[in-house]
Amino acid sequence: MKDTILYGDCRETLCGFLPQSARMCVTSPPYYGLRDYGGEDSQIGQEQTPEEFIEQLVNVFKEVRNVLTDDGTCWVNIGDSYYNYRPGRGQGLVKQTVSNTKQDLPDMCPRRGNRLEGLKEKDLIGIPWMFAFAMRADGWYLRQDIIWNKPNPMPESVKDRCTKAHEYIFLFSKNKKYFYDNEAIKEPAKDWGTRDRTNGKYHNEGSGLQPHSGLTKSYEKKNKRSVWSVTKKPYKGAHFAVFPPDLIEPCILAGSEKGDTILDPFMGSGTTAMVAKKLDRHYIGCELHENYGDLIEERVLPYENRLEKFFEEG
């Protein structure tokens, strides 16, 4: 089963994919307590406590693990929330601005009247690291935390802290040894030069240094760093929280090869599917709302024949 999206709650639909049918997973789950996507009261993100939210996510990724190959990886972008409880006014979480869209927008989550144990008003909840540690406890290898730096963050009117301009991407692996193409995502080294082993120092080209043959090495590329600066780019007519293609691309390049299948259990507006096809991969995924189907098809269509062409030329 390739290039397929199953509609419905991913906790129920993920079992529709064959075991070990995807090389990697890249996804962005719903935020905790920020949006009501309509439909079931039990939808992910609507739990009464952060702990319940994390538990539901871990259950989703149990199913994801079954779908991944033994050398597969899982890349998860997850955001945080602030706690804002006031007696008599219920629990509220920081709102997000919604851009114009042709799609029906999810409603804001209703305020909850329950006080959350261990949290004070204005506390940062710490959802990303709660999730990361829970995944590790469930058997995943927690390999890296990547910082998504947003050069154009959402404006905030706060005056007692910095404007939040980052989120996390966690890299998990199913096993100790896993597929990771380091070369595919290396970055240009801006100030590469040569190294003189006599003193261990680097010298830019043109420095006049003439070290002994065999004692130098050129460094034109460097390993990709763990802080990724990616600008948010709205897509006209799309889901309000579009997953930036430039954020997904290095994940797919590092975690898979051409012809592999990429899984996204929270497909949304189909960015993962679009980038997978653009990079000559297949995709499978789940999406709660079938009304995103036309939008996903529209975004994937321009790249639909790339993979067939790749294998014909190969």
Image (cartoon, rainbow, N blue to C red):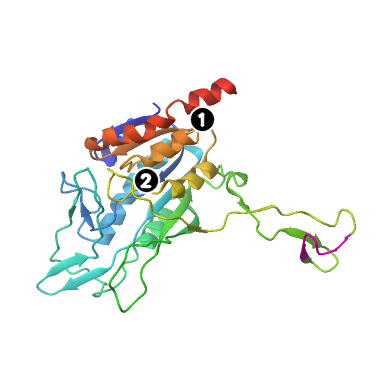
Q: Position of residue 168 (x, y in %)?
A: 42, 58
The N terminus sits in image quarter = top left
Q: Position of residue 58 (x, y in %)?
A: 34, 50
Q: Residues within 10 Å of mark 1 (few under 14, many from 20)?
A: some
| 124 w.r.t. 99: above or below | below
Q: Residue at x 48, y 33 (%)?
A: 281
Q: Is residue 30 left or right of residue 213?
A: left
Q: Is residue 1 left or right of residue 118?
A: right
| 190 w.r.t. 121: above or below | above
Q: Residue at x 30, y 43 (%)?
A: 268
Q: Residue at x 54, y 44 (%)?
A: 254
| Extreme residue toward the left, this view | 88
| Extreme residue toward the bottom, this view | 160
Q: Residues within 10 Å of mark 2 (few under 14, many from 20)?
A: many
Q: Position of residue 218 (x, y in %)?
A: 76, 54
Q: Is residue 164 magenta?
A: no
Label 1: which residue? 259
**Quarter of image, res 304:** top left
Per the rendering, the mark at residue 95 is none
Asked if residue 18 shows in the view, the reply is: no
The C terminus sits in image quarter = top right
Q: Give, as a single range, the part of the protein colored magenta.
A: 202-211
Label 2: which residue? 61
* Numbered label tally: 2
